[in-house]
Amino acid sequence: MTTSGQAGRRRRLQSFDNNGVKIDLRKFMDFTLVPGVDGASPEKLRFDPFLSGFGGTEMIIQFNFENPLEVSVGSTKDRIVARFTDPRLLIDTETGMFIQSPPMITELPRMFMSDNGTEVLMASCNVVASATNTMLVLFIIIGFSLVAMTKSIWQFINLVQIMAYLKYFVEWPANTKLGLECLDYSVSGRL
């Protein structure tokens, strides 16, 4: 036997419509968060449950977390344990008796950013990837130019060495001989 208040409550829940109707689930259910091992602190895992769908055989509850990126970050997943606070809320359709429901345990998957946040992150990732590719090509070009410059520098040093040692093969005037001697000192490191 049910009182008219309970029948009215049952009717309101069964005729659930998401068009502006808000039902405070905490009046009917108790939600306990069980953090996983190495997870975020419970202060970072505050949430608000809301009823997003209700039918004769199922009830869909969604959770809005204050910090969704902190959910299930540890080595084991966080869990939510849900219990009905009043056992008289569940009635067996065949017998009309109240049903004692065991607690419902739900493992929470690791959360991701909202769609807008994901789009911003993907756009910034694309910019970073493009900049990295450009820098890689630039470094390759700089590397090739340095190799070419190094070869040119060694050719120049070889030319200076040949000029410096020409003093031994040909008789030069005094001022040229002095210049070649200075080149010899700079090439051989005897400054």
Image (cartoon, rainbow, N blue to C red):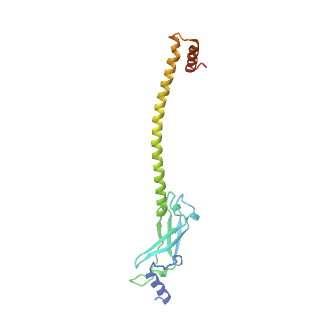
Q: Nearer the viewer, residue 178 or 189?
A: 178
Residue 44 place in picture, x, y as percent: 57, 63
Question: From what the image shows, is residue 51 above or below residue 125?
Answer: below
Query: Which residue is located at x 47 percent, y 47 percent?
Result: 132
Q: Nearer the viewer, residue 115 or 60?
A: 115
Left/right placement of residue 19 relative to residue 180 reads left
Query: Which residue is located at x 47 percent, y 41 percent?
Result: 138
Q: Residue furthest top?
A: 171
Q: Residue furthest left?
A: 94
Residue 32 place in picture, x, y as percent: 53, 69
Q: Nearer the viewer, residue 65 or 176?
A: 176
Residue 133 place in picture, x, y as percent: 45, 46
Q: What is the count of numbered marks?
A: 0
Q: Quadrant of the C terminus?
A: top right
Residue 55 place in picture, x, y as percent: 41, 78
Query: Which residue is located at x 56 percent, y 13 percent?
Result: 177
Query: Which residue is located at x 46 percent, y 45 percent?
Result: 134
Q: Nearer the viewer, residue 3 or 116?
A: 116
